[in-house]
Amino acid sequence: MSEARKGILAMIGACVIWGLSPLFFKALRHVPPIEILAHRTVWAFLFFCVVLRVQGRLGEMPRLLLMSPARVAVAAVMISANWFVYIWAIQVGHGIEASLGYYLFPLVAVLLGATVFRERLDRTQWFAVGLAAVAVALLSFGLKVVPVVSLVLAGTFGFYGMIKKGLDAGPVVSVTAEVAILLPIALAWLAWRYGQTANFPYSTGTAAMLFLSGTAYTAIPLMLFTYAARRARLVTIGLVQYLNPTLQFLCATLVFAEPFTLWHAMAFGLIWAALALYSGHAMAVERAVRKRSIRFPTSGTV
């Protein structure tokens, strides 16, 4: 099996885990989201530390914290806010809004690139962003409420990606540093929480699921994503990523039977059209770049 195919399979694995996570977090609805977040932080930190120790890279994490403490701290706030809002949304029945947020994320990332990094967008990209804005406005008008969950998830993940772009570290090292900053808060909250009850108030099954929230649903899919990013084409990764919100959407509509109105249908239709336009454009650009590189290969000699 080729390395590229291995990368695609790893990306599919990561997206399936993330995409089916609503089933997991819905089963934990008897546990408050902040408590799940605390466990997710603790177990993800320990798991990543073991991985980095095995790789001989554990020393890179404290160096990153010393070099870019403010940037890592802001990234930690963004990802923890994203995790918390997502878990809360699934538990209270806003899974459709959550999936919409992750559909919106690529277009939010493009907009952030244009406004923050002054990246130039062509008319096709601006049109895709415009379609997404119309979709949000249409949904807000139809439901008489702004889809705050969608905007918060797309925004926090977009800003998180923007901050990570400036970190001189691999994804596993940087995420370990981020959860390391959150770790004291998580441990303090858990100590207070279980100090109130004087014992662990859940079953062994729930304890196992809380452990898995930091390992199977955080660390492992991230490692699969990292593996894929090094082997598969970026355009392919971008297309496969849509499997995540699609599975979330199917969980919300088919499994949880959340109401899907005509306004939802119109908004999602516009978002899907925008993503199809954006992805098709990205594929065309990459194809043109590859043709030019084949036609005019670079050489190391003069």
Image (tube, rainbow, N blue to C red):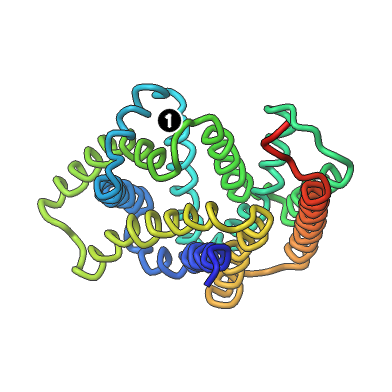
Residue at image location 81% in from the left, 44% down from the top: 296
Residue at image location 10% in from the left, 51% down from the top: 198
The quarter of the image holding the C terminus is top right
* Residue 131 in sight: no
- Identity of the residue furthest to the front in this view: 302
Tell which of 235 and 200 is nearer to you.
Answer: 235
Q: Position of residue 272 (x, y in %)?
A: 76, 61
Tell which of 56 and 99 is nearer to you.
Answer: 56
| Badge 1 amino acid | Val
Residue at image location 38% in from the left, 69% down from the top: 27
Q: How many marks?
A: 1
- Identity of the residue furthest to the left in this view: 198
Q: Position of residue 300 (x, y in %)?
A: 67, 36
Q: Residues within 10 Å of mark 1 (few under 14, many from 20)?
A: many
Q: With 204 as the anchor, is 151 left or right in this view?
A: right
Secondary element at tag 1: helix
195 vs 224: above or below:
above
Q: Position of residue 170 (x, y in %)?
A: 44, 40
* Residue 147 in sight: yes
Disc 1: which residue: 72
Residue at image location 42% in from the left, 24% down from the top: 68
Q: With 263 as the anchor, is 16 left or right in this view?
A: left
Tell which of 267 and 216 is nearer to you.
Answer: 216
Q: With 257 as the anchor, is 281 left or right in this view?
A: right
6 vs 152: above or below:
below
Q: Position of residue 87 (x, y in %)?
A: 45, 55
Tell which of 231 and 219 is nearer to you.
Answer: 231
- Identity of the residue furthest to the right in this view: 123
